[in-house]
Image: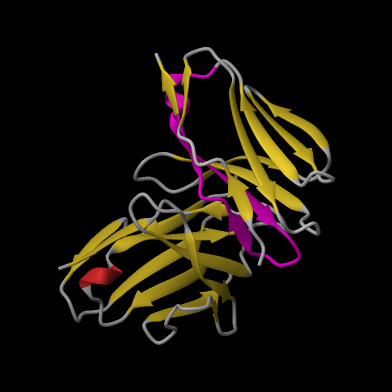
Amino acid sequence: QKEVEQNSGPLSVPEGAIASLNCTYSDRGSQSFFWYRQYSGKSPELIMSIYSNGDKEDGRFTAQLNKASQYVSLLIRDSQPSDSATYLCAVKGGSEKLVFGKGMKLTVNP
Amino acid sequence: GAVVSQHPSWVICKSGTSVKIECRSLDFQATTMFWYRQFPKQSLMLMATSNEGSKATYEQGVEKDKFLINHASLTLSTLTVTSAHPEDSSFYICSATPEAYEQYFGPGTRLTVT
């Protein structure tokens, strides 16, 4: 069974710090990797996608992928209170379906 | 990013009645849409994959006769919760993929069955 594991958290960081979120996956054939942000009571919002090994940067967000280690991470620089949310790691293999981790709750303290 | 809408955003119904939720892709065509359910403080649970012009594929444990899915066009999928009961109260979210990779979610529908 394909699995995606995230640290259960929660994670608390001060405003302005770097938040680091990690995710491992079991299916070595996975091709596409995503990070979603979900505010309480809202639906998930896609914030990053990454498909090849290395880093991908978008503003304050950097996704990192290491397929050999089956590891994907999300770094949030200069964390803001508005970044406080649950972050979901999702992985897609050969089918259209996404496999989600259980999510990591991030709190950024002012 | 692509835009997915849902209607209604919230609904309250009485036990035993049926409720229909619509999911629309507003600026792209979606051959495939997905329906999820999320209970409070829990992760997303995929219920079914909705395919335009064909029957939906349900995940294990999801009652296909209770959760009817119709994907009548490339921009519209509907989920009907039949004979709803209080345990069906949940947050229902659809998603769609404009291209082969990224999946975008609708805003969700909060269902309360009294």
Residue at the limit of the structure toward the bottom, as seen here: B65
Residue at figure coordinates x 25%, y 77% from the top left: B84
Name the quadrant of the C terminus of chain B.
bottom left
A95 part of magenta stretch: yes
Side of B60 where B92 appears, left or right = left
B79 part of magenta stretch: no
Q: How many numbered discs, if any?
A: 0
In the displayed structure, A15 sits above or below A30; it is above
**Front residue of B80 and B46:** B46
In the displayed structure, B52 sits above or below A1; it is below
Side of A55 where B1 appears, left or right = left
Residue A109 location in percent, x, y? Answer: 40, 18
Residue at figure coordinates x 36%, y 68% from the top left: B21
Q: Is residue B75 visible?
A: no
Which colour scheme appears in the figure? secondary structure
Q: Which residues are magenta?
A: A79-106
Quadrant in the picture for residue B73: bottom right
**Front residue of A100 and B70:** A100
Residue at figure coordinates x 55%, y 74% from the top left: B50
Residue at figure coordinates x 44%, y 84% from the top left: B64
Side of A95 where B72 appears, left or right = left
**Front residue of B107 and A21:** A21
Q: Is residue B87 visible?
A: yes
In the displayed structure, A39 sits above or below B18; it is above
Residue A77 location in percent, x, y? Answer: 61, 19
